[in-house]
Amino acid sequence: MNRAGTSNGTAPSTAIADLDWRGGASAAGPLVIRGAHALDPGSGLDRICDLVIRDGRIAEIAESGAGRAPEGAEEIDAAGLHAFPAFFDPHVHLRSPGQEHKEDIETGTRAAAAGGYCGVVAMANTDPVVDDPAHVLALRERAQAEASVPTGFVATVTRGMRGEELTEMAAIRAAGAVGFSDDGLPIASARVMRRALQYQHLVGGTILLHEEDPELSGDGVMNEGPVSAALGLSGVPAVSESVMIARDAALCLYEDATAHVQHLSARVSVEAVETAKAAGAKLTAELTPHHLVLTDEEVRSLDARFKMNPPLRTEDDRQALIEALRRGTVDCIGTDHAPHAIDEKDVPFEIAMMGVTGLETAFAVLYTELVLPGVLDLGLIVERMGAGARLFDLDQPEIAVDAAANVVLVDLEHDWEGGAEGWESRSDNSCFHGRALKSRPMITIVGGEVAFRRRSFSMRVAG
Amino acid sequence: MRNLLSIDDLDRADVERICDRARSFAEVGRRDIKKVPTLRGRTIVSLFYESSTRTSSSFELAAKRLSADVVSIKSAGSSVDKGESLRDTIATLSAYGPEAIIIRSPQAGAAALVAGWTEAAVINAGDGKHEHPSQALLDVYTLIERVGPLDGKRIWIVGDVAHSRVARSCIRAFGLMGARVTLAGPPTLIPRGIDELGCEVSYTLDDLGEADVVYALRMQRERMTDSFVPSLREYAITYQINERRLGPRQLLMHPGPVNRGVELAPEVIDGPNSLITTQVASGLLVRMAILYEILAGSGERPRPVRGVEQAPEPASPIGGPA
């Protein structure tokens, strides 16, 4: 793969399977998925059919039972299951290098595969932070040995994530980074932000923004409002996020640059993005499953599983996020999968680390909490869970003849409890721990290879 | 009552029972030997992660008056300073088989977490800016002893509400007992949304005259450097409770320690309407009542003590001198 030296805005799109992972080295054998209900709002597919996969691509979409199995093909009886384009997560923390007690590339991408993802992009706020070409090359090499799904890496925008000087963005791009982000921290200086947007015209690559005004956030640990007032916790006001979005949208407009706003959490932020898009700013936006289904009422328990940044907001904010997803203000869903070890979470709320895991629960949570009650359409969820690929000029997964075979088979009737059987992730800090969930990815196919197969499913087929 | 973590866990009957019990302990304090054998042979751990004079000494003395064995741990010089986690500290202390752990922590929710980690009863002696339930209970007791039932009484809590766990517990406790609570202070120090706890908010003292009770909060010096108020002088001009603002029929309370000349003028601290020293005296009685309620109370018998026979004395707190 070579993404070096692409110029502004003209980067050709690349296949997800060309990102680094341990698969794709040798040609996978053919597969036939029989009798799944295939649903892809992108290609308009919505029916029970057979999918024939050959040479990493979807070779044929046939009437159920009519798919011709190539020589030596594995047949998967998918009757009763749904087949969706596999998901792509533009926002995960794999914690390598330096924080492997929380997660590493192997465990994090296994969690991704188990969650139905065919690709992820790992953030750079590791220890040390990924701020030079050598780090990027080392991570890519590691991913080629360990990653269950194709993995892209971003580097930081600023050296040491200190927000002062730009990293060697051109050299970092040449080393294969898919973009840049100081995620975890905002770029507090408008001057540095502006320079990064200017320099992006030379180097390309998506700039992903964690939007927060550190002065307004202060020592806040949760959303500012009645709940923080009652608990005596310092609050992060929603405007801490929206004022930075407004600032960076203005800079993007002025510099004719593009940027991606990560994890929107509040109504005022949605409004800031809408205003910016209406003014012609080239912004994209993402939000997380936990902000879509939970509110700061959860924090009344003072359980650090509900501590993350940005924090859970109010019901009004949650409704605004749902509406933003529906209207298209928000382009994609990312999990902000942020693993932490138990001893970093099993402490008083105020000193607990910020962040929750999300890869293994994302689809089930959205399906259980939003699709089943009729709040959001299943097709919309499926589309936005794959749309993150486009931020990086990657082909969004689709189920269509000749498309790369990135497919997830989901059992929409599967009942399970978050965390009851443990996790593929090394960490247990899911805010959906103990929650009753319906639907679960059973098989994840990436570039025609089976990247994940749930054991219970295999047993059911065998029995 | 299993633990005392938050006023939210109590109902009105619980508070009245604690007040009744505290009243009965007042008699013990008038004896030559101020001690009853109720908690003889029981171990109580007092774990303070923040400096505290009155709360820790009050709890310690209350436990000793009930004949409990008390182990007091302050964070300075303890394993806490060596980086031990709260969970590990609690596991270590729990190995001694204490009946109760009294904990003061700079973090909200610490006491509730501890309650999930130990078999001992847990008493919250202050968790961050969240709650300080024993303070609110002693304040309720102090007021009831002076004015009778609090139903319909108007109580103004004045000052730095944002950083005050006392305020948060008092809003809940006064409201539970039927009082109408108003918070007054600079807008920078009244947290957004606190009115949802069931109180009014005022940024001036213009209507302070309606209050039956004025409860002033401590104004800390560092609030000035954080730009919450421009100066203590300006704060005092706007919010200080002085003779001019405090009417003759209005009672004055303060959780201590007082910044003389800041939130309170010296003349009102020592004036006839001040309940401040009564609060301290009540604190001892109410904390005895809390320990009694949790460790020997009528509701549930305390759990058997491992390896030791259950103490056989009757439930009455007014036993003979030990």
Image (cartoon, rainbow, N blue to C red):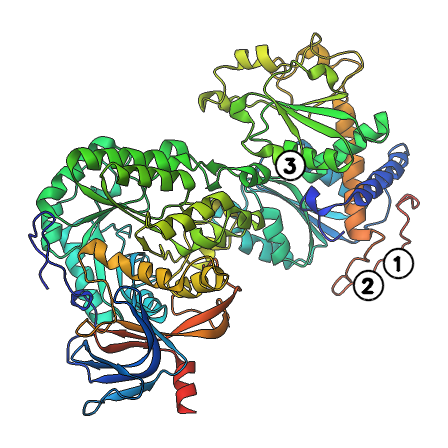
- Residue A274 or residue A195, whichever sits in front: A274
Q: Residue at x 83, y 54 (%)?
A: B299
- Kindly state the secondary structure of the residue where label 3 is placed: helix
Does label 3 or label 2 sit earlier along the sequence? 3
Q: Identify residue for label 3.
A: B197
Name which residue type carries label 3.
Leu
Q: Identify residue for label 1.
A: B312
- Kindly state the secondary structure of the residue where label 2 is placed: loop
- Label 3 neighbourhood size at 10 Å, few (<14), some (14-19), many (20+)? some
Q: CA distance from mark 1 to mark 3?
A: 43 Å
Q: Residue at x 69, y 58 (%)?
A: B97
Name which residue type carries label 2.
Glu
The answer to whether residue B231 is visible is yes
Q: Nearer the viewer, mark 1 or mark 3?
A: 3
Q: Are marks 1 and 2 in contact (CB under 8 Å)?
A: yes
Q: Which mark is residue B54?
A: none
- Residue A231 or residue B219, whichever sits in front: A231
**Given the image, what chain letter belongs to the residue carrying mark 3?**
B
Does label 1 or label 3 sit earlier along the sequence? 3
Q: Which mark is residue B309?
A: 2
